[in-house]
Image: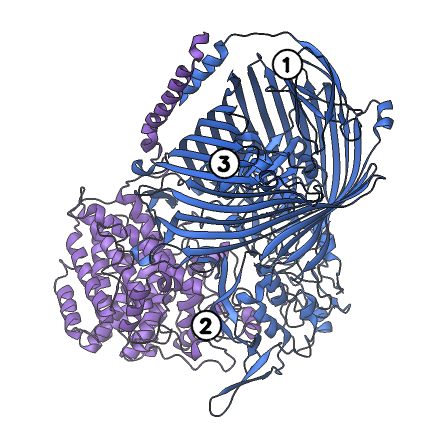
Chain colours: A blue, B purple
Amino acid sequence: MRKVLLLFIWVCLCSPVAFAQVRQLTGKVTAAEDGLGLAGASIIYKGTNVGTNADADGNFSFSVPGDGVLVISYVGFLIKEMPIGNQTKFDIKLDADTRQLAEVVVTAFGIEREKKALGYTVQEVKGSALTESRSTNVANALSGKIAGVRVQSNGGPGSGSTIQIRGSSSVSGNNQPLIVIDGVPMEQTANKTWGGGISEINPDNIKEMSVLKGPNAAALYGSRAANGVILITTKNGQGTKGLGVDINSNISFERPWIKPNFQNTYGGGNGYRTWYNDGWSGNITDPAEIAQYRAVYDARYPLVGSEGTDESWGAPMDGRLVRQWWTGDDVAPLTPQPNNWDEYWNTGRTTTNSIALNGGNDKGYFRLGLSRVDQTGIMYYNDFHRNNFRINSGYNLTKNLSITLSGEYIKSGSDNKSYGSGQEFIWSHRHVSWAQLRDYESYMDVHNQRGNDTDPPNWQHTFFTNPYFSQKKLPQSNEKDRLLGNIALNYKILPSLSLMIRSGTDYWTDTRINVSNFLRVRNGVRTPGRFSEEVLRSQETNSDFMLTYNKNINADFGLNVQVGGIKRTNYYKRNYFYVGEMVVDGLYNAGNSVPSQNTIESEIRKSETQSLFGTANLSWRDALFLDLTARNDWSSTLPANARSYFYPSASLSAVLTELFDVKSNVFTFGKVRASYAQVGNDATPYQLAQTYLASGSWNGAVPKFSENTQIANSGLKPEITTGLELGADLRFLKGKIGLDVTYYNQTTKDQILGVEISKASGYNTRILNAGKITNKGIEISISGTPVKLPGGFSWDVSVNWARNRNKVVELAEGLTTYTLATQRGMSSEARVGQPYGTFYGVGFQKYNGQVVYGSNGLPFTAAGQKLGNIQPDWIGGMLNTFNYKGWSLSALVDVRMGGDIYDEGTGTARWTGQYAETALGREEGVIGQGVREVTAADGSKSYVPNDIIVTANQLYGYSNPRNYHESAIFDASYVKLREVSLGYSFSPALLKKVKIQSAKISLVGRNVWMIFKNTPHIDPEIDAKGGNQQGFGYGELPSSRSIGANLSLSF
Amino acid sequence: MKSILTHKNIWMTALAGAMSITSCTKDFDSMNVSPNSPTAIGPQYLLPTGIETSVDRYWGHRDRFERINIDAAELYVQHLTRNIYSNEGDDYTVSPALLSNNWKGFFNDGLLNFQRIINQTNAQSASPNANYEGVALVMRTWVFSLLTDMYGSIPYTDAIKGTGTDPIYTPKYDSMETIYAGLLNDLKTANEKLSVSGPAIAGDILYAGDILKWKKFANSLRLRLANRQAAKKPAESKAIFAEILGDATKFPIFTSNADNASLKCTTVLPSNNEWNQILIQGGRTDWNISKTLADKMNALGDTRITVYANPNKDGLYQGHANGLPDAIATGYLATSSTIGKAFTDAAAPEVIMTFADLNFILAEAAIDGDITGDAKKYFEAGITASFAQYGLTPPADYMTKAGPVSKEKVIEQKWISLFGQGVEAWIEWRRTGFPVFPAPDPRAVLNNGGVLPTRFNYPASEYSLNATAVGDGVKLNGGADDMKTKLWWAEK
């Protein structure tokens, strides 16, 4: 492989350099229908990157290296090709494309193809749609815009998102799509805290994104494309005249969005008592304090502080005088703090400033994009910053040889990302003020705690440390450097034969420091400062070559053949140390440690895949298209006899309106398509041989190892995903209404799984080829222009809808379930016959759908119940855009219907008396909603409405999701007004005077309005674990609403 | 130059490229050898892992929902009680996670590593070392005995064979009777393998390579198991007692507290005592001394309570009743004694078997007629040894207060001496019914129909992964898979 690349480079560099005669061309592009100039029409010197765009009146001028053909294109018009000959002045008239289907989309390997030629679905998002309603993480801006793509955003500054296209196909593997930037893969991780992959991209650099869903669209990307591909094409400056400057500046502010409905009647503590003694559960002994206590609590109440209990079953907040954490030996009125949620959170701020320089002439083009993001989170002291430096460039070395370069350096990091979730509103005292707790330093002298304890002042000490202190003094910080890019050579060997060779890499290194403890004395026990440092390094390099043969065999038949090869190498390295005891607190250096308390770890992963592939596209009369692909991979992670695997695909598309010569103003265009594809997948490295794992040391001195409890498998095979896709693309009323429908059926089998076995075998799991999962679904997108007035007003709508039905067909022999995630004994499982991600746990007994209570007024429970499923019934989105003169207004509604979440936070906060419903009937008693079981003398059972009064905290004890999982299962449906933006583009005439090409200002809101949800207290869009372990939550960082302004200028 | 670009050349080059791809895969095999984890390792590195994980788990485990000792056994036997979260053990609720994590932990972390050492060092192996084999056999036997004594019938003959030549992924269950016969035989074999003049061993964090002490532990443990099954297999047990007690040279047993099998924890985290981790490092205050134990020890004037517990604010050693609901139990937080420093220190030992324990076993055997010997002598030696373990001597009138020697009194004293070893005390209570616990407090709210658990349920994972075998296991126990079915050695 290396040899052949070198040979090709040598061949290309040594080929004769011939400069042809340069000539200057001018002209005007107009619409044939009305003769008006087409501003921005593209004029390209065919077969090269040389080209320009027409100005506001449709005029253009540029120079070409010699004779050839011009390709003129404009959105909504048919592409026109014109030979140059001796002509230097052109008057070009473009015919309107009533079918509006000559759209060109980017497919595998960045090959641009006409959409009508494709036998599978590709959906696109333009860069402008991503930059305006800006989210720092580009992935989040996809939510609701593309049928079948679900984005689960999670968390604070710089965090990642889980992206899922057409459901989960792999039981245990990575279900994230492959991200490809300018033809080169970028590693995508959905890490909640650290982000990674697509979240690091600067949206200003994106020209367009296309989403290739499922294996059919992605057969040529191989293994990792089984979950779909997100192809990102960046702006490259092509077509710029002279030097252009683009500036974009954005600022946005965010606040937490959904506020829980708290009770503001009872304070913290238990037994109707609220009293701070020393931060722990313990006796009140000081006579003065006893006198204060007895002034509000009579002899029925024990002489014990109540702050050791982190719940809110305390005294009524009626202004009674009690000791609180900040009163020292004094007392103060106990008053409600209804705004303590609002006090708790910071107003987050994000500023993004980008500048890009574009330049181009007949020899080449470039674009240099720089940007800086500064973000502060809604949790105090959390931040994120990112610098992106991107260069895209192309140069025509000769008429036939061109070189392109695309590279980006991303420097990102954070001083503190430590807040992922918190329990400050779950295990808490309703009477505390967070503004006051944030100001803990003012209370150092007055605050009471045990003995010589040194903890910072807090509302209690048994379980919690002041969160603001922790945020400040226990940061999780990181510095990440990432470089990705590629160099490609294109050589036109013959007019119909060209060769591309390319090499690209994605390299990153991240240093993470996590401070986990500070030197303190707590309850008389001294614990030292502790921290860890982790240095990660990862690199993926892809080198490929591709020969393209493109020829129309005759007037009817067209042929396009590509063959190529790729070598991919992956390298990962982790170095980690943990300092269990710092000598001097606050100095984070490995040398500052008590050596016996240190832990060190490291890991290396290396793998390589080599591939050969070929594709043939046949077309007949621009109406029938047949695509065939074939690929063979050789992977280092599989055993020698199984490392080579082959997979093919075929797709067919027929343009019915063309085939049957339909010429109708109603039914303008119709296409049907079908495709079948296979994608093979290899294993993660080192699963073939049994190993022993290092497991630290005894007493810091005796090294320990243990046998790996996963049984290796020397006979692994590749896993195979097979997909069938059928679809239709219909356009009506001259393209005013478009409908695209897709049905797919996808099966993944021979999945490489760590299958659980009886622990009595001595082992936990076996690596096996097992499992079969099917995903079937329908995706519909409708687009239309309901109103278009001559005055310039237009209203565009696009709607997309998708449902996916997922089923686990089989696992390994004798195995019926595979556990994806567990929390508190509640599990999300892949069970045979059930959809992926079904919840099992302890539920409530039901009679006719009503909870059954016993004679004690408390519900009956039953273990091992099926409680829900993480997968939504359907997802969809609707985008409305209104344009009038320079104004544009757009609104995106994002919908998820069905699917469940297990939010331990909501259940627990009820159990601990935080929410409004728990304040009702606290002193009178409550009756659980449902029926009561009555057993007659003969043993027969009947059911009457429950009428037994119990105490509120007894009943809400059954909201404890640790034991009663069903109490925390909620329907995760939502309808959100996800984005609203209002923009104004200044008129070109006005701008010309100040030498500005274009200027646009817009106001943007994200998470504007929660139109509908079924969850009390929280936004149902939560995801604590990410990836395949979706559906769990426990005090997650609340989602936030942001409002911002965006200004973009081009010179 | 132009000639190089002929079609022929291009296709030849492409072909060469294809050829070079296949030939480049030659180094794939070496690339896929893990640079992180060895494929072979000496027994001295597996031994400390096996010992630490097993003993830690038996003594407590630092994670919630895994603690069979202080979240189950120590509460069942009323050494300890809860002042909050009584539904974590004190009211007989047992979390599904506790059942499955311990089942998994003992098999995967303990037994697997002991078995690997045996396979690496036995006579058929490439590098035989009878002392490693013997030590691993003793530890394997002890862990198996814990599992069978907690769950009942378990996989034994088929167990830990997931990577054998004929791998077993769904091991069958054996009856406790079969397992006990096997365990007793394994301990005899271990004593034969272990040789003071044999090869040295390393990584022994229990006895620091002292093979004589391992022999003593092997034989003392064999006496424990023989005694446990004595009512069911009298002849076999008698023979074992006779064999061991008849030849002290060939079958050495514990002769002082210096021989005790206990893991000497250290102040270097995470090698600290599990209770230290939970109560001190973790700052949990959920446990107090049970009223049952405090009352009994106060009545006996037993000074060991000054070691087991801390005095309350009035300077008294007091406990509260087990199984009280949280609302009531929290009130006792301020008045009940907490666990003593000797058990919450970072370096507090985690005890498997003591000289006191051995004496009580012999006292019981003497009473039951399994051995000929002076029951009273063993009884009093047991009490003295238990006091001595904490640097104490029994008060002058203690032996009188402890009462005339009887099976009940022996087990009662054993129960007091087993403070900290909840699992062991729970086994003895289930076998003998002693001590007789007071009736539950009228305010207590108890699960399991109010029945003190007689065993643990099998974990749910066995039903999904080894269904047929676990079904047979339930039948072998002769009762439902619940916490009320009595195990094979139960005498009452």
- Dot 2 falls on a residue whose secondary structure is loop
| Res A626 label | 3
Nearer the observer, A501 or A116: A116
Mark 3 and mark 1: Cα distance apart in space: 36 Å
Relative to the observer, which residue lies in front, A161 or A836?
Answer: A836
For the point 61% across and 81% down, the residue is A946
Marks 3 and 2 sit apart, C-alpha to C-alpha, by: 80 Å
Name the residue located 56 percent from the left edge and 18 percent from the top edge.
A403
Q: Is residue A792 above or below residue B11?
A: below
In percent of width and height, residue B143 lies at 29, 59
Q: Chain of mark 1?
A: A
Instruction: Specify whether residue B286 is in view.
Output: yes
In the rendered structure, which amino acid carries the disc numbered 2?
Answer: Ser
- Closer mark to the observer between disc 1 and disc 2: 1
State which tag comes first along the sequence, 3 or 1. 1
Q: Position of residue A616 (x, y in %)?
A: 47, 31
Residue A353 sits in quarter:
top right
**Of circles 3 and 2, which is in front?**
3
Amino acid beneath label 3: Leu
Give the numbered dot on residue A363. Answer: 1
Q: Residue at x 26, y 58 (%)?
A: B159
Q: Mark 2 — residue?
A: B290
Question: Pointers 1 and 2 in contact (CB under 8 A)?
Answer: no
Q: Amino acid at mark 1?
A: Lys
Q: Depth-wise, is mark 3 or mark 1 nearer the camera?
A: 3
Query: For numbered disc 3, what is the local secondary structure?
Result: strand
Q: Are marks 3 and 1 in contact (CB under 8 Å)?
A: no
